[in-house]
Amino acid sequence: MRKLVVKAVALSIFGLGMLLPSLQAAKTNVLYKDQVAVIMYHHVDDDAKSAGTITTKLFEDQLTYLKNKGYQFITLQQFRDYMQGAKVPHNAVLVTFDDGYESFYVNAYPILKHMRIPAVNFVITGDLENPLASYIPSLSKDEIVEMTTDTNFIDAQCHSNSFHYKLPDGSAALLGRIVTDGKKETEEQYKQRVLGDTQACVAKLGELYPGPIDAYAYPFGFYDNKTIDYIGQGGMKYAFTIVPEMATRDEDPMQIPRINAGNSAVTPEVLDSSIMRRIVAPAPSSQEVPLADTMNQLGGKATAAADGTVTIQYQSGQWTGTANANKLTARAGGKTIALQKPLVLKNNKVFIALKDLETVIGAQIVYNPTVQSFSVRQTPAAKK
């Protein structure tokens, strides 16, 4: 008994020793607050070559670099809590894997366990019955049980039960409609197919460990509003996309963005830079911004004529108004937008309230303090 106690204490001291440098770095190097960089991997292998494969050395180098710089790795449960309003550590990172490859257990898990870095693997549960039959060997039930039992920071979640393939028309199995004998499945049949597949995934993982099975990664990143509805009915509360943005509470929990880290070209420095470029800081809605300069940053255009006429162009839309007025009129259809604050002319520049500009262009505007500019929030919007 005494030996077990000594071993436990030694492990605690070892774990604390590894954790302290990261915590100290985070205290002195606050890169971002109240948001999470969800990073995505697939295959960690030293021999395979593909766009979704990295070597064990690169994987370890990426994690070591981020940890030393002050990034703090969180568990899936901490991410759930954050999305529900809880605080999250500064510089938070959630590590995710798709496809449930055995390489996660063989190559990635030992590194994660040694460094005490949490991760979640989105598993195709239909492969659990015969994991070695896959083109790339998959995780076995025993391997999942071992990883989730030996640690409290490795999770297995859903990547569908059997939807990781394309239909004959090229659409993803999750999103498309199956055609049998020339007859396309009805919407009710489609709903039951998605619902049944999701419930099967939950049931199979639920047999392996007691944690909640409520998170999903869309196969191939394809989904639509009906998909969201049906997997939600199947028990999913969080779903992850492949849109490369930071995750904030402003996101639909069924459309969580992720930044790709699992490519051989993504060096530790490139990964760090990729995260830094996507830091978001929603500006106060009352803030007034220079219209022309801000529209240039957003990819649009704004001009002010000598007579005070103001024109805003963004994508296919165009609106006109006048300085000191509190409305804009759309060129197409003549629809009027009432502004909360009038357009203001200062030092020969027209200023507009940021909230009003968001209303005009129909998108959230965020400020990136790293590059000191505004951008349109790239939302992973589902197809209608």
Image (tube, rainbow, N blue to C red):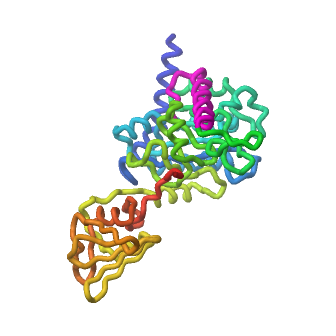
Picture coordinates of residue 237 (x, y %)? 47, 35
Q: In this view, does 284 lie to the left or right of 25?
A: left
Q: How many marks do you count on the picture?
A: 0
At a point 37% along the width and 62% down the height, the residue shown is 367
Q: Is residue 76 left or right of residue 307?
A: right
Q: Quadrant of residue 198?
A: top right
Picture coordinates of residue 76 (x, y %)? 48, 36
Q: In the picture shown, does residue 69 fall above or below 210? A: below
Q: In this view, does 12 lie to the left or right of 204?
A: left
Q: Residue furthest toward the top?
A: 1
Do we see residue 110 in this rendering? no
At a point 36% along the width and 50% down the height, the residue shown is 33
Q: Residue furthest toward the bottom?
A: 306
Do we see residue 57 in this rendering? yes
Q: In the picture shown, does residue 13 fall above or below 256? A: above
Q: Does the magenta stretch include residue 305?
A: no
Q: Quadrant of residue 206?
A: top right
Q: Does the magenta stretch include residue 201?
A: yes
At a point 42% along the width and 56% down the height, the residue shown is 279
Residues rendered magenta in the picture: 188-215
Q: In the picture shown, does residue 354 fall above or below 227? A: below
Magenta stretch secondary structure, dominant: helix
Picture coordinates of residue 223 (x, y %)? 57, 46
Between residues 377 and 309, which one lies in front from this camera angle? 309
Picture coordinates of residue 62 (x, y %)? 57, 50
At a point 22% along the width and 70% down the height, the residue shown is 326
Between residues 295 and 245, which one lies in front from this camera angle? 295
Q: In this view, does 319 lie to the left or right of 133?
A: left
Between residues 56 and 152, which one lies in front from this camera angle? 152
